[in-house]
Each structure stands twice: as C-alpha cells, then as structure tokens.
Image: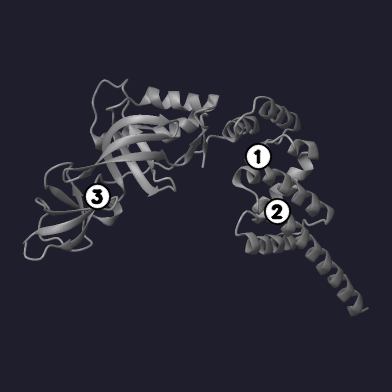
C-alpha cells in the first residue's frame, strides 16, 4: 500500500514549523547574551546553554540530522560556539544539573569540566567543592580529570637543528654576502663562512650563536629551535628568556608554554604551578625553546627544555634539546596544568 503523500507532507510541515520555532527561541536567547558586557556574558552563558539543552530535550532534538542542522544554522548566525559537540554538551548539561546549579555563578568552563566526571557522586562532590571554595575553572578542570581517571596527555617532543636561518636574497655587489631571516621578523646582512659554496634564496643554514660561521641544513632538519638563558619566571605557564637567534643577535622574549594551561597565580593551584617552575628553573639557567606563533597577548608559544640544576655536568644546547627535561610535560605530569 502506498503511503499517503498528503499525510507525509503534513508531518514534514509540522516538523519544519517546530524546528523554526526552536531556532527562533534559541536565537533570541543567544542574542540577549551576546548584547551583554563581557563580565555579565561569561556568567550568562551557563544559563543560556542550560536553557538550550532544556529546549532541545523538550523538542526531542537528538537525531543527528537535526543536531547538524541546528549547529549549522546557529553558527551561521553567531559565528561559533554551537558545534555538534557543544550542542551535545548542552543537552548533557541539562540532564545532569538542575536549574538551581546554574544560579551558583559557575561559568560554562566550570560545567564543561564537571561533565567529564561520569560518577554522579564524584561529580556532585566536586560541584559542591567548586561552589564552596570558589575554585577557578582551571582548578576544577584538574580535579575533574583526576576524578574521571583520565590519563595524562602526552605532548609531542620533536628535534631539529638549532638557529636555522633562511636566505632571503644575495646582496648585490658583495660577493658571498646574503640577507638572512633569523626568525621573529629579524634580518641580518652577513657573509657566512663554512657553507661550502654560494648561497641562494631559500637555502637553509644553521648559524652560530655569534660570528659568521654557518652549516647548510635540509628542510627535514628545519624547526624553530633556539637556545638562550632564563631571565625570570612570570607564573606557572609563562617565562621570560633571552634567546640567541644567531650571528650575535639576541632577543628578549616573553614565552607562554605551549599545550598547557596553569591556573591563575592568584589561586592555590596557580601558586603550586608557579612554585614548581621556579624550583625547576633559576635565572641564568640555559634553556632551549621550540617556538611557535605568538598568542593574542604578544607572547610566543614554546616548548621549554632545560638541563636541571641537580645535574652536576653541564650540557650543550643540543643535548638539552635531545635529553633535557621537558617543562611543559612536567606540569601536566604533576597535575598542575591542563592540556590546551
């Protein structure tokens, strides 16, 4: 027997109308939050996401196609924040916490961390602790990982040649002289020795800390590895170092540890992370950095390697990079930072 096409059309029309009503309602709530100041918006997000979870549950929006559609439409309106994964968390948020929990002032970051904890009793205990002790979202994230029995994330440790510079161009009228890009928007004009022939634009050379000696390297050896000395520790995930770019050029850099997030130093966990870094590194200690792009605050992201004051023998920068301690990983191993 053939299905009634009119009935099918009526069902689809009803579903479309219900979805449109849901999208309109959720969009209106989101627009209200978007119009708030940053301080008010951070707290309002928890209430917004709980309400979205509630409305999705009421409308029985659980089918993959509907979730994808809602994600696509919300992201088109608001830019980001409504991925399928986040919508799933909003539904889970609604099912695991009642409306009174949302009024405690905990941020969405707090609740996202709490959602990692599968055991109801452990999650409720951590929620109570977060409210009573006014824990930061970082502190809750660390405690949640422990409560959930999650393993320690392992950062990728790579190796490569130190102080690799790229030839930008030859210098007209000066045989053998080239313009080198040392990194960090720093260029020098130099006549290198020891490179075995003329250099051309695009060639890679490892340059000495000082002087004009260089060694050709291939693309596989290229990284952004630099040696230097620690000036001071700022907090649990930020340090200041004076870095050798090569050819006698140094640069003072504010470095944010890549891949880890320590709690703010105003918190107990933040002070613990700061104490660990200060114990591991002293002003003047040699360090090796694998650098990445700068963050929005002008700090370069980096993996930080050091030899350690407890080791009696000194080590070259190459040995520190190859066999030294990996500060970023140590913070994760100690449970004093979360992976980011």
| Tag 2 near tag 3, CB within 8 Å | no
Q: In the drawing, what numbered circle is on residue 107?
A: 1
Q: Are marks 1 and 2 in contact (CB under 8 Å)?
A: no
Q: Is residue 3 visible?
A: no
Tell me if residue 24 comes above or below residue 311 in the rendering: below
The residues tagged by marks 1 and 2 sit, at their Cα atoms, a distance apart of: 17 Å
Q: Earlier in the sequence, mark 2 or mark 3?
A: 2
Asked whether residue 271 is in view, the answer is yes
Seen in the image, is 139 located left or right of residue 118?
A: left
Residue pictured at 73% horizontal, 54% vertical: 29
Q: Nearer the viewer, mark 2 or mark 3?
A: 2
Q: Quadrant of residue 301?
A: top left
Sooner in the amino-acid sequence: mark 3 or mark 1: 1
Circle 3 sits on which residue? 164
Disc 3, SS: strand
Depth check, mark 3 against mark 1: the one in front is 1
Residue 218 screen position, x and y as percent: 24, 55
- Residue 110, how many percent across, how many down? 64, 37
Of the numbered discs in the image, which one, if any, rests on residue 32?
A: 2
Q: Check disc 1: other Cα within 10 Å, few if <14, some if 14-19, many if 20+.
A: some
Asked if residue 159 lies left or right of residue 19, the reply is: left
Q: Quadrant of residue 130?
A: top right
Residue 103: quadrant of the picture: top right
Numbered label tally: 3
Residue 238 higher or lower than 213, as above or below: above
């Amino acid at each position: 027997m053939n299905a009634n096409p009119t009935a099918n059309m009526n069902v689809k029309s009803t579903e479309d109308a219900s979805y449109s009503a849901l999208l309109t309602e959720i969009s209106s709530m989101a627009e209200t939050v978007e119009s708030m100041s940053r301080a008010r918006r951070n707290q309002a997000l928890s209430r917004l996401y709980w309400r979205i979870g509630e409305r999705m549950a009421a409308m029985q929006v659980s089918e993959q196609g509907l979730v994808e559609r809602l994600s696509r439409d919300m992201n088109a309106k608001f830019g980001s924040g409504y991925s399928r994964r986040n919508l799933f968390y909003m539904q889970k948020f609604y099912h695991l916490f009642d409306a009174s929990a949302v009024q405690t002032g905990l941020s969405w970051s707090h609740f996202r961390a709490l959602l990692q904890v599968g055991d109801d009793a452990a999650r409720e205990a951590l929620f109570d602790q977060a409210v009573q002790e006014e824990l930061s979202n970082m502190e809750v994230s660390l405690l949640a990982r422990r409560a959930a029995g999650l393993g320690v994330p392992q950062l990728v440790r790579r190796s490569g040649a130190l102080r690799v510079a790229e030839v930008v161009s030859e210098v007209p009228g000066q045989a053998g002289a080239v313009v080198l890009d040392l990194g960090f928007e720093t260029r020098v004009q130099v006549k290198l020795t020891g490179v075995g022939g003329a250099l051309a634009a695009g060639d890679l050379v490892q340059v000495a800390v000082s002087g004009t000696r260089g060694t050709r390297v291939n693309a596989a050896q290229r990284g952004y590895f630099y040696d230097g000395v620690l000036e001071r520790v700022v907090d649990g995930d930020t340090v200041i170092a004076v870095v050798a770019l090569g050819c006698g050029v140094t640069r003072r850099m504010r470095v944010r540890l890549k891949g880890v997030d320590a709690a703010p130093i105003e918190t107990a966990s933040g002070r613990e992370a700061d104490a660990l870094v200060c114990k591991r590194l002293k002003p003047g200690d040699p360090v090796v950095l694998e650098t990445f792009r700068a963050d929005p605050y002008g700090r370069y992201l980096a993996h930080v390697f050091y030899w350690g004051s407890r080791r009696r023998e000194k080590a070259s920068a190459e040995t520190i990079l190859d066999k030294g301690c990996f500060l970023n990983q140590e913070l994760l191993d100690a449970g004093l930072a979360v992976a980011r």
